[in-house]
Amino acid sequence: MTQRYELIVFDWDGTLMDSTGLIVQCVQQAARDLGLISPPDSAARHIIGLGLGDALRHALPDLPEDRYEKVVDRYRHHYLSRDHEVNLFDGAADLVKMLAEKGKLLGVATGKSRRGLDRALAHSGLGDYFGATRCADECHSKPHPQMLEELMAEFAVLPEQTLMIGDTTHDLLMAKNAGVAALGVSYGAHPRATLEEVTPLYCADAMPELVAWLAANA
């Protein structure tokens, strides 16, 4: 495959940051705080990548609409009190730096809030490598293509010159809706079999596999 991608867009949680476990725990704790039955791990993992409001509506579909805001508040309380505990996947920082040194334009499209992403970028030390980012409280939630469309417009890059990398079908479907190629990573929230249903170009089971593919093809 020729090296044709000018812009590489990463999802954050479960793709660069090893935060899936904490997100699941915080969703479950937020439900318990309000006396609700917490969703099982599989349900809580499946919603990762969506905007928080949409995610909690999927995880707790029977909750009255006027109670979702309270669940959101409890989730944020738990996550923001512990987000310092999570770190990048081993090799993620080196991967981002390698791509930057190759002259690639780098972006982030995430289900996190702007406040959450800014905290994560500062904690990780990677903020300076990403020329633009989009969050779920600024755009439609994945799999709507708005995040990618805005990033491509900001960088003046065409869909065929863009690559999306993510650990959920929400990421891969967003890419498909934007006419953008995508890579899946199965070490995050969604398993390989689920990701492959959306037919990404490649699915990496570990960070070294992702690094190798990008070194050869991006």
Image: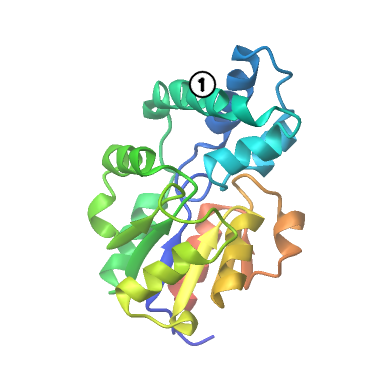
> Which of the 4 image quadrants contains residue 194?
bottom right
Q: Quadrant of the N terminus?
A: bottom right
The number of discs equals 1
User: Dot 1, crowdedness within 10 Å: few (<14), some or many (≥20)?
Assistant: some
Residue 171: image location, x then y, percent: 58, 59
Residue type, label 1: Arg
Residue 180 percent coordinates (x, y): 54, 75
Residue 175 in picture, x, y percent from top left: 56, 68
Position of the C terminus by quadrant: bottom left
Of residue 185 and residue 28, the one placed in the foreground of this image is: 28
**Foreground residue among 93 and 11:** 11
Task: Say which of 215 and 11 sits in front.
Answer: 11
Is 40 rendered above or below residue 213?
A: above
Res. 107 image quadrant? bottom left
Q: Residue at x 50, y 47 (%)?
A: 111
**Residue 36 appears at what percent x and percent y?**
70, 17
- Give the residue at mark 1: 74
